[in-house]
Amino acid sequence: MALRVLLFLAAAISNTVSTTDHIVGGNKGWNPGINYTLWTNNQTFYAGDFISFRYEKTQHNVLQVDKLGYDSCRIEGALGNWSSGKDFILLDKSKRYYFICGIGGCSNGMKVSVLVHPLAPPPMSAVSAVHSSEKSVAPVIVGGFGSSSVVLVRLMIYVYYWI
């Protein structure tokens, strides 16, 4: 409880920063047969945003790979591995990220590549959390103390909402 109060106060007294949780595939989730390229074309990713994967954990997983792993569905040398069925991954750098399903789903289209842009300027002064299943993103407007600590503050607020 004390942690939640501290996080709320830190957010309330600071400048605003916006972060978004991009739910891969929207309400269809992380499953075979979905065109994730079309999904990414309707998203804009910024450093500090989250990408989340929702799937049946006994059937799929998420691996972060390099471009070669993405193109060839190769799991060797994976940069990250998630398997909870409800994975939240911080996109902390401005770069291209590659994710695949390492349990055979990649060859059935379960792969997504996202280009993360540098942190955007804050849109407004507020502290709020809104989930939108139609656009498959959940904007979260929270406080930040400057670009070097933005990711930490965003992560703290994100943890607050999921505790």
Image (cartoon, rainbow, N blue to C red):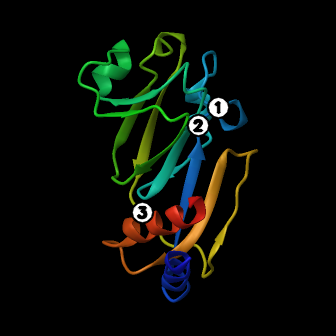
Residue drawn 42% across and 42% down? 115
Quarter of the image with the C terminus is bottom right
Residue 57 x, y percent position in the rendering: 55, 27
Q: Quadrant of residue 71?
A: top left
Q: Is residue 120 visible?
A: no
Amino acid at dot 2: Val
Residue 38 x, y percent position in the rendering: 61, 29
Q: Residues within 10 Å of mark 2 (few under 14, many from 20)?
A: many
Indicate whether 23 appears above or below 118. Answer: above
Lower sequence index among marks 3 and 2: 2
Check if mark 1's residue and mark 2's residue have beta carbons within 8 Å: yes
Foreground of the two, 4 or 133: 4
Q: Which of the two discs, 3 and 2, sits closer to the camera? A: 2
**Label 1 – label 3 distance at C-alpha:** 26 Å
Spot the residue most to the left.
77
Amino acid at dot 3: Leu
Foreground of the two, 11 or 1: 1
**Label 3 – label 2 distance at C-alpha:** 20 Å
Secondary structure under tag 3 reads loop
The disc label shown at residue 24, or none: 2
Lower sequence index among marks 1 and 3: 1
**Label 1 – label 2 distance at C-alpha:** 6 Å
Q: Residue under circle 1?
A: 29
Residue drawn 52% across and 80% down? 2
Q: Is residue 86 visible?
A: yes
Amino acid at dot 1: Gly
Q: Residues within 10 Å of mark 1 (few under 14, many from 20)?
A: some
Q: Which of the two discs, 1 and 3, sits closer to the camera? A: 1
Check if mark 1's residue and mark 3's residue have beta carbons within 8 Å: no
